């Protein structure tokens, strides 16, 4: 697996294409066979293909529902289906990805029978689909795991804790399209330049601030929360140093957009469990784990309020989890409230 030297020790590489960046990562590892590199560039290609559809969403006949319901019980949008098909099709081509697990499919899909197809991919092809038709930011989330056993991949092969991820990333289709990736050391962001058809390095070595002033939670769930979450929200609304407005609130309703803002600005994003979503709403394997890897690599943290997300041993492919992502300072206070150490 490739990893990258910390960016702080190098001259700025601003403007580098994502393809060159991925290749440089491989060249730093003389023994690398190029399979991991190939998988990353396939994901970059998928992002270009999906962004071209998203950018034409209001023009082409891709808005609205397919009439189907996915494994999560959610209605499938046409763009959800297209994004999923694009990822499955492209990833099945070069024989490096043995199998994939998607939010849109009940079980895993075998993609390559090659014995040296060493990798497994997990993804949410189009996060925030209820925001598609109203032209609000949506995204794609992905993670790469190694296939640890010979023979055809099984669902069990995917049930690895997030700390085993080799790489994680997301693409945000926002005011511009950005591809953010980590292999565990640094987090880098590439902005898509549609005039040249390339992702260019625009956010080198992203570090989340130690403390931020924005919190994100869907407060319409308040009556269903446990007391610890209600106490935390009451505290954060009052201001961390006593009465006064030191925090402000935002909620897009697309994890990728809310998490992206939190990564760049600091603060905290959470979707806790509640009486309706008893184990949380967001999915562990292809939503929480990739973001947890990214936040930790950027100097932040990711918890359930009681444990580190990356240490959770999954038991099911589509398992849901209480997820809080953010700056170290805000996550520490959140953990204290959820575990009952603080009530203030
Ligand atoms: P959709 O893909 O169905 O829009 O769900 C998006 C999402 O899983 C996640 O991206 C948001 O953070 C969360 O749901 C928003 O949930 P609420 O609608 O309950 O606020």
Image (cartoon, grey):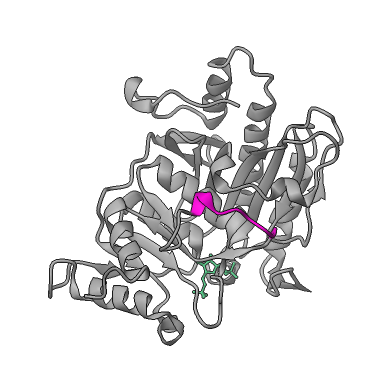
Q: Quadrant of residue 225?
A: bottom left
Residue occupying the point 30% across, 57% down: 332
The kind of secondary structure the magenta stretch mainly shows is loop
Q: Give the farthest residue toward the bottom.
A: 223
**Number of callouts:** 0
Q: Quadrant of residue 2?
A: top right
Residue range corresponding to the magenta coloring: 309-317
Indicate whether 185 appears above or below 126: above
Ligand 1 lies in which image quarter?
A: bottom right
Q: Is residue 14 found left or right of 315 in the rendered image?
A: left
Q: Give the farthest residue toward the top.
A: 30
Q: Is residue 314 found left or right of 156 in the rendered image?
A: left
Q: Quadrant of residue 215?
A: bottom left
Q: Position of residue 171 (x, y in %)?
A: 54, 49
Q: Is residue 185 visible?
A: yes
Q: Is residue 53 visible?
A: no
Q: Give the farthest residue toward the front.
A: 341
Image quadrant occupied by the N terminus: top right
Question: Observer-nearest residue: 174 or 91?
Answer: 91
Residue occupying the point 39% across, 29% down: 14
Q: Position of residue 221 (x, y in %)?
A: 45, 82
Question: Observer-nearest residue: 109 or 139?
Answer: 109
Residue occupying the point 70% across, 75% down: 73
- Residue 321 on the magenta span: no
Indicate whether 80 appears above or below 108: below
Q: Position of residue 286 (x, y in %)?
A: 61, 54
Image quadrant occupied by the C terminus: bottom left
- Residue 313 on the magenta span: yes
Question: Observer-nearest residue: 287 or 87?
Answer: 287
């Amino acid at each position: 697996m490739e990893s990258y030297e910390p960016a702080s020790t190098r001259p700025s590489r601003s403007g580098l294409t994502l393809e060159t960046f991925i290749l440089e990562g491989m060249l730093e590892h003389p023994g690398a066979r190029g399979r991991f590199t190939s998988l990353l560039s396939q994901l970059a290609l998928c992002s270009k293909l999906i962004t071209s559809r998203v950018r034409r969403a209001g023009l082409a006949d891709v808005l609205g529902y397919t009439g189907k319901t996915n494994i999560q019980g959610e209605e499938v949008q046409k763009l959800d289906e297209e994004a999923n098909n694009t990822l499955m099709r492209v990833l099945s081509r070069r024989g490096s990805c043995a199998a994939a697990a998607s939010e849109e499919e009940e079980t895993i899909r075998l993609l390559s029978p090659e014995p040296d197809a060493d990798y497994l991919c997990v993804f949410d092809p189009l996060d925030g689909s209820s925001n598609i038709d109203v032209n609000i930011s949506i995204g794609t989330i992905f993670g790469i795991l190694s296939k640890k056993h010979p023979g055809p991949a099984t669902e069990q092969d995917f049930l690895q804790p997030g700390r085993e991820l080799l790489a994680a990333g997301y693409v945000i289709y926002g005011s511009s399209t950005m591809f953010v990736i980590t292999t565990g050391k640094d987090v880098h962001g590439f902005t898509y330049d549609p005039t040249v058809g390339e992702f260019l390095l625009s956010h080198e070595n992203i570090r989340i601030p130690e403390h931020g002033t924005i919190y994100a939670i869907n407060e319409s769930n308040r009556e269903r929360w446990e007391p610890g979450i209600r106490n935390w929200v009451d505290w954060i609304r009052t201001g961390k140093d006593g009465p006064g407005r030191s925090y402000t609130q935002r909620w897009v309703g697309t994890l990728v957009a809310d998490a992206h803002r939190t990564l760049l600005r600091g603060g905290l994003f959470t979707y806790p469990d509640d009486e309706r979503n008893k184990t949380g709403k967001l999915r562990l394997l292809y939503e929480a784990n990739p973001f947890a890897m990214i936040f930790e690599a950027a100097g932040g943290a990711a918890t359930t309020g009681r444990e580190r997300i990356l240490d959770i041993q999954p038991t099911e492919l589509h398992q849901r989890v209480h997820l809080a992502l953010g700056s170290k300072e805000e996550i520490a206070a959140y953990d204290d409230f959820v575990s009952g150490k603080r009530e203030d």
